[in-house]
Amino acid sequence: MQFIDRRQAGQLLAGDLARYRDDPNVVVLALPRGGVPVAFEVATALRAPLDVFIVRKLGLPGHEEFAMGAIASGGVMVMNPDVAAFHVPQASIDAVATRERAELERRERLYRGHRRPIDLHDRTAVLVDDGLATGSTMLAAARSARLQQPKAVVVAVPVAAAEAVNALRREVDDVVCLATPEPFRAVGLWYRHFDQTTDDEVRALLDSAWEAEGKRGDA
């Protein structure tokens, strides 16, 4: 299964999340940047509020595409157990974490501005990304979301490695994934168009979603 782009993938994903439509307790949380176009379509279809949930991958020095782990808002850090085989010095891990924490804070300011994050307490948090390879980034997001004591944490992605889905099922209340192809290799292989999502696109989609949410609230 290959998706045309992230927007189409989000529309298809929303179909498998229809049970959450018009539930006032549901909030859709996008993992920037690639998860935002997917989550925008999901939130639109579910008529649910959209927010960003900032998570940063910790790339292995020299091989940044490999995730040593991830950090998320709330001070959560998740490490990939496979990183032990690379014998990465702790100082190198700390340096990567410091750099990515600064980028996490920058994106919080850039994307949300003065808007406060949506309170997740006693709500159903649907975490959305464009795909999962190792799953470490989504795992960090799920654990960080748990700190806010939501009613449930749901992970929703168009495509993922089967191992990542199985690992997340042990951590969250539900995982919705349209495809787990084998061999998986990389998220981008399962999209016809997989251009990098820009900061401007993220902000435009969030502004549009927040405007629509305001109109629903006024109705």
Image (spheres, helix red, strand yellow):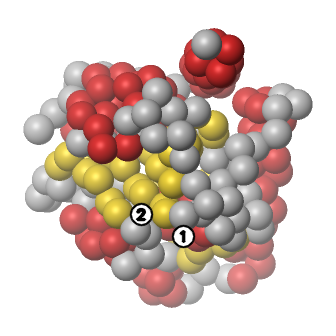
Decide: few, some or many residues near mark 2? Use Cα within 10 Å; few <14, some 14-19, many ≥20.
many
Image quarter (top left, top right, bottom left or bottom right) of the C terminus: top right
Q: Nearer the viewer, residue 13 or 216?
A: 216
Nearer-N-terminus badge (1/2):
1
Q: Is residue 20 toward the left or the right of residue 206 in the image? A: left
Residue under the image location 38 percent in, 26 percent down:
45
Residue 41 location, x and y as percent? Answer: 41, 25
Residue 3 shows which numbered tag? none
Circle 1: residue type = Met
Residue under the image location 73 percent in, 30 percent down:
111
Q: In the rendered image, which residue does mark 1 sit on? A: 68
Decide: few, some or many residues near mark 1? Use Cα within 10 Å; few <14, some 14-19, many ≥20.
many
Circle 2: residue type = Gly
Q: Is residue 165 above or below residue 47?
A: below
Q: Residue furthest front?
A: 219
Residue 20 location, x and y as percent? Answer: 38, 43
Q: Nearer the viewer, residue 12 or 4?
A: 12
Q: Is residue 55 above or below residue 11?
A: below
Residue 27 location, x and y as percent? Answer: 55, 43
Does residue 56 appear in this view? no
Residue 108 location, x and y as percent? Answer: 78, 40
Q: Secondary structure under badge 1?
A: strand
| Res 77 → quadrant | bottom right
| Res 188 → quadrant | top left
Image quarter (top left, top right, bottom left or bottom right) of the N terminus: top left
Measure the C-alpha gap from mark 1 to mark 2.
Answer: 11 Å
Residue under the image location 76 percent in, 64 percent down:
74
Q: In the rendered image, which residue does mark 2 sit on? A: 135
Q: Is residue 82 toward the left or the right of residue 97 in the image? A: left
Q: Is residue 53 above or below residue 96?
A: above
Residue under the image location 18 percent in, 55 percent down:
180
